Structure formats: C-alpha cells, structure tokens
Amino acid sequence: MLAWYDAHRAELPWRASRDPYRVWLSEIMLQQTQVETVKPYFLRFVAAFPSVEALAAAPLDEVLKLWEGLGYYSRARNLHRAAQIVARELGGRFPDSIEGLLALPGIGRYTAGAIASIAFGVRAPVLDGNVIRVFSRLIDLEDDVTQAATQAQLWRLAEERLPDERPGDYNQALMELGRLVCRPREPLCAQCPVREHCLAFARGTQRQRPVKKAKATTPHYHVAAGIIRDDAGRLLIAQRPLDGLLGGLWEFPGGKQEDGETLQECLRRELREELAIEVEVGELFTVVRHGFTHFKITLHAFECRYVSGPPQAIGVRAFAWVTPEQLSDYSFGKADRQVIAALAARRAMLL
DNA sequence: CTCCAGGGTT
DNA sequence: AACCCTGGAG
C-alpha cells in the first residue's frame, strides 16, 4: 500500500504541509464532500484565515459566507467553535491524542483518526466511505455496512491492518485507493495493488460490494417564499435559526405549504408568524426544485409588496432590508441562490 | 429526472 | 435511527 501511495499520491492543497490546522480544516471540509469540490473552498479559507487564531477571531457570518455552497452548514458552525476552543483554551495548539481531538465539536472517530495519524504520526485507524468500500471488497463482506455491528467489525479490521510505520500515509493510501481505483461504480481492478488479496475480485462480486440497505423514498414539499420589496426597491431577507436545516444561512422568507391552503395563503401566514408583517402577494416570479438528504422541495418565489408592520425577528435569527447588489454579501443555500440568479437575469434583461 | 457519493450529532 | 446538503453520473 505504501509503495503504491508513494507512486500515485495526488498533489492536493492540504498535502503541502502537516500543519494540524490545515489537516483539520481539510478533513472537516472532506466530510461527506468530494476532493474536487473541496479544493477551491480550502484555498479561499486558508487565504482568509491563515491560522486557527484568525479563524477564531472572525465573526460566524464571515465563516458561513466562505462556506456557502459547500453544504452541511453545521460543519462551519462547529469549525468556528472548535477554533475558538483551540485558540483560547489550548494556546493555539491542536490536541495530538484521539481523546483530545474527539472533545472538539465536529470531530468524530474518523476525523480524530485522520488528524492524529496525518498531522501527528499517531497509530490510529480511519474508516470513511472509501475505506469501507475497500475492506468490504477485500473480505467480500455480505453484511449491510450501515449496521452498527458491521461498522464495529470494519473498525477492528482497520485497526488490525494498520502498520506501525507511517500510519498517516497508510490511511491516506487506503482512502486514495478507494477514491481512484476501488471506485464505487467501475472499480479499476487491473490497476489495484492488492487485487491478489481481494476476495470480491476472486469471486467477481466487486460491484455488489459494499452492501447497503435501500433508502426510504423521500417526501416532497412545496415551499412559498416572498421577494418582498419596499418603496425604495430594497428586498427583505431573513436569517434562519442557527440550529437545524441551513442553520445560520439567509433566505427569502416563507415556509412549507400546509394541507388545504394555497401557496399565497401559505406565504402570508408564514410572514405573519416569522416576521409579523403584512404583504400583498403578487406574481409568481420563479419556481426552483431542490433535493435534500431526506426530502425534496419545490420552491415557489412570489413577488410581494410590503404593506405594514415593522418586521420583528420572531421565527428567524435576524432580518435585513438590502439592495439587490448587497445580496452577494450574505450566505444563501442553493435553492435561494437560484432565485437570486433569476433576479439578476431579470435585471440584466431590463437594463 | 433518479440515484448515489460522502461523517457527525443528537 | 433520524437529521443534515450539494455535485456528478447515468
């Protein structure tokens, strides 16, 4: 594995050094996110925050803005909290033990093992989606890998196989092998350095591994959102609560349609509940579809005229009246970014 | 369009 | 076991 890694190791921005800050930042970004997606975000982050102290000193909104589009925004909030703990309570030094790392928000068993082994040379295993795939094929595992008992078995396997020498490189080699060779769909077994030891290869079952139970079908919701303008042409936007879906991100206010109400009724209700305002709902401006982990939405964005009631942050963290140009200063999720793109296209057409 | 990839928290 | 996002492949 190590010989293969030495020959095939990819040059990645976070592999330029073993600086624990950069290893940590890259590992958080790489959670549930693929290498190519992470690259530009990592480079922007280290340019904006060259040290854990710089990150700790930044306002959360600035961190969320740099995270915009990367998804799983609780990672950004935990990253910020962890930076403040490291900078203020640990003298700027990252823990070098598994236990110390696990105590930081956003770090679980995988990330602790990755940081400890890569940045500090500790003999600690990792088990991510890539490693699960490699091992489940090596031993031709027929058990459902989403089950806790199977995961425990795979962690034991990762621990047993881990060499004393260069554990960080070995872990990265396993993950790199899973990413580039032992790929999910069409594994490149001809190029695999461990194919002689692979039971699935011997039996021709690579494509059936790993075994995962089928996912339940996801519900579909209709959401109404208001593009609310005042007489000066400014737009009313709201910041979502810090916990939960898209926590801390901004949005065009609105919410889920309930049984028996029209989208227009839904929008007026949501705006009363969240902001205590009355609006006149106008034309449907655009419709956007978006999928999440466990449900999908169709977002209906309506032109609205602000009528009355000074906005109050009841069901939202904050609100702001902004010009269309200022929208880029705020962090939005993907669906609302599509609405903003449609707004920009409309403006470009009118000019 | 649907399906799938990818860890941590509660 | 439910919850949390986006990008790419087919």
Image (cartoon, coloured by chain):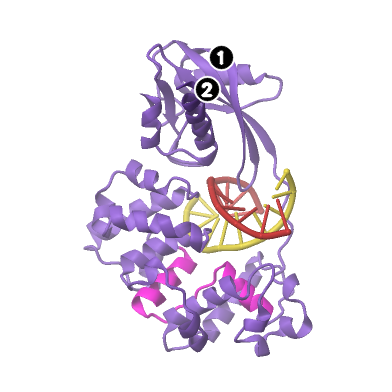
Chain colours: A purple, B yellow, C red
The part of the chain drawn in magenta is A108-137
Neighbor class of circle 2 (other Cα within 10 Å; few <14, some 14-19, many 20+) is: many
- Letter of the chain that mark 1 sits on in the rendering: A
Residue at image x 54%, y 78%?
A174
In the rendered structure, which amino acid carries the disc numbered 1?
A: Val
Q: Quadrant of residue A283?
A: top right
Same subunit, tags 2 and 1:
yes
Residue A12 tag number:
none
Looking at the image, which residue is at 71% across and 68% down? A144
Left or right: where A44 falls relative to A88: right
Percent x, y of residue A25: 38, 61
Q: Is residue A119 visible?
A: yes
Label 2 – label 1 distance at C-alpha: 8 Å
The residue that label 1 is drawn on is: A281
Q: Which residue is at a point 72% across and 68% down the rendered structure image?
A: A211
Q: Is residue A345 above or below residue A82?
A: above
Left or right, A86 with reference to A302: left
The overriding secondary structure of the stretch rendered in magenta is: helix
**Residue A83 horizontal/vertical position (percent):** 31, 56
Q: Position of residue A275 (x, y in %)?
A: 45, 21
- Residue holding disc 2: A226
- Check if mark 2's residue and mark 1's residue have beta carbons within 8 Å: yes
Residue A210 inside the magenta-drawn segment: no
**Relative to residue A212, is residue A18 depicted above or below?**
below
Tell me, yes or no, if residue A82 can be seen here.
Answer: no
| Amino acid residing under circle 2 | Gly
